[in-house]
Image (cartoon, grey):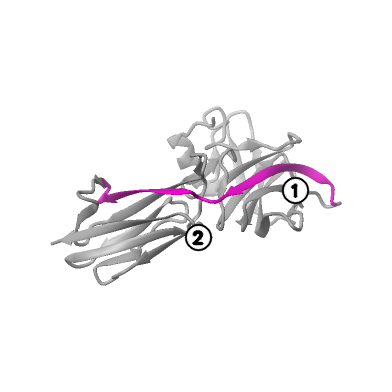
Amino acid sequence: MRPYAFACLLALASFTLVAGACNFKLGDDTEGEMGNLRFSYTGSGCFFGCALDKKVLEGGKVSVNVSGDTQGGFTAVIDDGSPATVSTQTETCTCNSGNSSSTHSRIVQAGVSCESGETKTCSMNVEITAANEGFSKLKVLDGKGAVVDQVDIAARPAARLDLAVTANDVAVEPKDGVYTVRVHANGKLAVKAFDADGDELFWSRDGLTFTYDDQRVVEGGGDALSSANYEAFTPLVSGDATVEVATAGGGAHAAVRFHVTP
């Protein structure tokens, strides 16, 4: 478990870290099989990273951050014929310097060398499409094609979707299966996906579809962050509307009925 620290967030915003106060990482991650790199999900409620202990929702895309003691030049691959594929990958590098009281980091291009007295570290962000159910081996290769580290990515279909509604950040409890919300409330429809064993699945927005039967009454989309695990919606006028939620690959689905009041 890697603790959160508000002080470090302020420091990260300026890329300056105070040694002793921020000598840890935020969020959670998973060590690779060879112990050389660390892997974590990003997005969908994992802004600072989540460990890969959850399976991925079949049919969606997820982002995996790869970090470790590296100077870059790596490539992420998944063998042909695997259930998942690598969609895109980017590498971000920093040049770091400092002393016993503080350190400073600046972002540089992957192929740029650091100045004297600086050390270079890089991380990767790999977008993975989990098209089918099963296990895939995410491998990170060096410039010579040798495996630096690897980790399993597992995908499963959802058997159940659990929904929760908030309006202006206050939980809305349904009455007779209907959620009553006011016009122009800041609405959020949170979704949790579970497999047939009851284990919660990690999902991205690409893994679920949201269908609104009347967007004159309730409009979907909103301004939800890519890292959020909810669908934003806005009640526009008084009336009734239904939102259908389904997995991208079919199978599990659920519905929310809204009653909008002035």
Which of the pair 45/216 is nearer the observer?
Answer: 216
Q: Point out residue 123 in the picture as x, y percentages from the top left corner.
A: 66, 47
- Mark carried by residue 250: 2
Q: Residue furthest right?
A: 144
Residue bearing mark 1: 140
Where 144 falls versus 33 (above or below)?
A: below
Q: Point out residue 103 in the picture as x, y percentages from the top left corner.
A: 60, 37
SS for dot 1: strand
The reply to whether the C-beta atoms of the residues labelled 2 and 1 are less than 8 Å apart is no
Q: Can residue 18 be seen by looking at this rendering?
A: yes
Alpha carbon distance from label 2 to label 1: 32 Å
Please name the residue shown 74% across and 54% down the image.
Answer: 77
Q: Earlier in the sequence, mark 2 or mark 1?
A: 1
Disc 1 marks which amino acid? Val
Give neighbour class at mark 1: few <14, some 14-19, many 20+ (Cα, 10 Å): many
Please name the residue shown 56% across and 58% down the image.
Answer: 59
Considering the whole magenta stretch, tell me its main secondary structure. strand
Q: Quadrant of residue 18?
A: top right
Q: Point out residue 100 in the picture as x, y percentages from the top left corner.
A: 62, 28
Disc 2 marks which amino acid? Gly
- Mark carried by residue 186: none
What are the residue bounds of the magenta stretch? Answer: 145-170
SS for dot 2: loop
Left/right of residue 104 with respect to residue 245 in the rendered view: right
Q: Can residue 119 be seen by looking at this rendering?
A: no
Which of the pair 3/254 is nearer the observer?
Answer: 254
Where 190 falls versus 209 (above or below)?
A: above
Q: Nearer the viewer, mark 2 or mark 1?
A: 2
